[in-house]
Image (cartoon, rainbow, N blue to C red):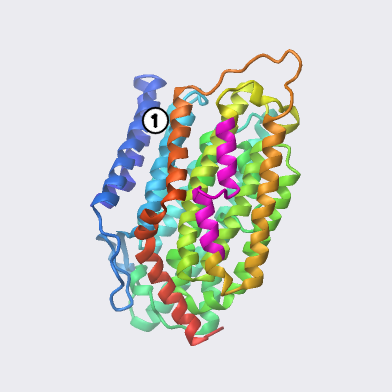
Amino acid sequence: MILLWLILIPFIGGLLSWQGERFVGRGFPRWVALLTMLFALGISVWLWVVGDYSLPAVGGKPQWTIEYQASWIPRFGISLHLAMDGLALLLVVLTNLLGVMAVACSWREIERNVGFFHLNLLWNLGGVVGVFLTLDLFLFFFLWEMMLVPMYFLIALWGHNAPGGKGRIYAATKFFIFTQASGLIMLLAILGLVFVHYQQTGHFSFDYMDLLGMSMAPSVEMLLMLGFFIAFAVKTPMVPFHSWLPDAHSQAPTAGSVDLAGILLKTAAFGMLRFALPLFPNASHAFAPVAMGFGVLGIIYGAFMCFSQNDIKRLVAYSSVSHMGFVLVGVYAGTQQALQGVVVQMLAHGLSAGALFILCGEIYERIHTRELSQMGGLWARFPYLPPIAMFFAAASLGLPGMGNFVGEFLILLGSWNIAPLTTALAATGLVMGAVYTLILVQRAFHGAPAAGAPPLKDLGRRELAMMGVLMLLLLGLGVYPQTVLNTSASAMHQVHTIYSAAAATGVAP
């Protein structure tokens, strides 16, 4: 039942925030949202401390540390089936942590319709938590689509103030169309998978445990796998389905960008690890060279696009395209090392990208521009913000001692024996990442400030507290990643076992 509450708490908090503004005032929704996400974070950390996440698979079926199941629509085999393993736990903790950061960073940024803003923010977070916990494919699809609606409103209503609001409406609509269209393809694949199960057993089921391990014709398996893959590839985002992301980031409020980069992109990688590979192992193995090739394309293309950006938020957005390319390579390498690296990379990227977008928002709040050509010399005008930004930029480029380095190193190490050429090409992204990151730091912070430029208000206690927490977590993940690796080891071993069995049979559609 605790898993159900992890989903419901943000929904309840969002409703209280929305209605609280009407009866109490604008300050009330902020505190309700903050306390709600702190409470959810406390529960998820407590589950991490007391739970055993090293459960081995039994009879080829994964085991869950916590599981909850209740009948919902039995006629069609639909149930409220929630479960938590090490992978789901880590991503739920990340979601709730960045949820706290999203509420905190929007404390002074959002002044209009504060209650409705926090309703959308918390409902988006609740939907994401549900995606990480559900094992029923009907419920998974419902939450997958539902979490997009609040994000649409976050971008469309509180996005960047382009003339006439057209910029933010365009970005929100583009985001919605891309994700909804790909979600429709996944729905068709889910229905196809359920129909195959019905043909074999005579009854309907949307339950992951029932659908796992089904035999099907190679061509059917490939077709259904592609339906899932396309939905996840769009959300990753994989080149060439990535164009919605820079537009969404450039128009979104700071909290929306934190959610997009830190949390929503991770739902796609999670979907590949939880559903695409285990449900369709043979098709996934046959498709792996193509998927890894797209991952390398994303790494290199995203890095190249960073060189040409003048908007600091678009630059960080394209860097996310590049970093998530490593995740795609690691997922389809399928080795234990690469899969563990994917988990670390998701966590580290969520922390570092979330921090960078928060800092972008703080810079815009002070100088009222995101154009790098209008910056320069900021180091002389801020005591704290530039060195903190340089820390997270260094983390993003994969500096040893930071969590991003551990994730990318494990991905490359685990992929080398599988695809050495692909791995070598992916490694060039590290060099390119270092170059565009240093260019960003040089253009934004170094140089002489304009003549007569006054000192600017530096980060306050609220911002410093947020940055301090994220810095400590990135350092902890980089210096001692073993806690995370131990937590996710069993879940990743189960994925690796299923995937490697398909590789051993050599079955290809």
Q: Is residue 83 left or right of residue 317?
A: left
Left or right of 294 in this view: 93? left
Kind of residue indicated by mark 1 = Trp
Residue 329 visible in the current orientation: yes
Please identify the dominant SS of the magenta region: helix
Q: Please name the residue that numbered disc 1 is placed on.
A: 18
Image x and y of residue 467, in percent:
48, 33
Hey, which quadrant is residue 384 in on the image? top right
- Start and end of the magenta stretch? 387-412
- State how many labels appear: 1
Q: Secondary structure at mark 1?
A: helix
Q: Is residue 152 left or right of residue 472?
A: right
The x, y position of residue 177, in whole percent, is: 60, 51
Which residue is located at x 71 percent, y 28 percent? 375
In magenta stretch: residue 395:
yes
Query: Of 61 and 434, which appears nearest the observer?
Result: 434
Residue at x-position 54% and y-position 66%: 413
